[in-house]
Image (cartoon, grey):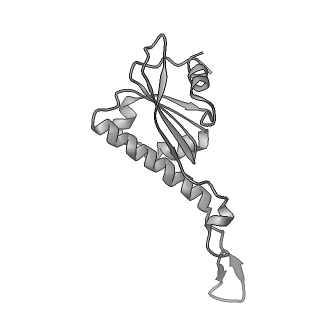
Amino acid sequence: MTAVKLAEGEWVVVCDGAKALILENIGDTKFPNLKILSVREQDDPPTRELGAERPGRVHASNGSAHSSVEQTDWHDRAEEQFLHKIVTDLEAHIEHGKIRDLTIVAPPRALGMMRAHYNHALKEILRHEIAHDYVKKPVNEIEKLLTT
């Protein structure tokens, strides 16, 4: 990965489908210093514990054929709702002038889910999207991975 130059005051969101670290660079471009603004987590139970019933069955309108309906992936849905909430909160901070520059670090799948919800204002200030899973790493290691 190429080193990222983080602007002074730039927000860095490091997340996956169940946890998000909201960081701010309180240093400068040459010597970044990421400070935790917020940590958000949601329970991450397996899909089997989230669904209520077995998948349904569909019967053909003529004849005796029938088949099952694919079960909803509740885990996937919970991840998408969590990531959508992160994007919505970022957009509110942008609207209130709290964020001027933004970098988002997330696994590729999570980035795709988030991208679907970006508004114009967020796209305007988004400086970097980094497709890596750093959310379980300590902040000083995240800082090193991003800037070296």
34 displayed left or right of 138: left
Comparing 18 with 74, the one in front is 18
Of 143 and 67, which appears nearest the observer?
143
Q: Residue at x 32, y 32 (%)?
A: 98
> Which residue is at a point 62% across and 87% down the rendered structure image?
61
Quarter occupied by the C terminus = top right
Up the image or down, 139 lies above or below 78; here it is above
Q: Position of residue 40 (x, y in %)?
A: 50, 44
- Measuring from the top left, give residue 32's x and y in whole percent: 48, 17
Q: Is 91 in front, or is 115?
A: 91
Choose top left, top right, bottom left or bottom right for residue 74.
bottom right
Query: What residue is drawn where x is 70% and y is 89%?
Result: 63
| 74 shown above or below 2 | below
Count of marks overlaid on the render: 0
Check the picture and name the quadrant holding the N terminus. Answer: top right
Residue at the far left: name it: 96
Q: Position of residue 141 (x, y in %)?
A: 61, 24
- The extreme top residue here reads 30
The residue lying at 67 percent from left, 59 percent from top is 46
Q: Position of residue 81 (x, y in %)?
A: 49, 54
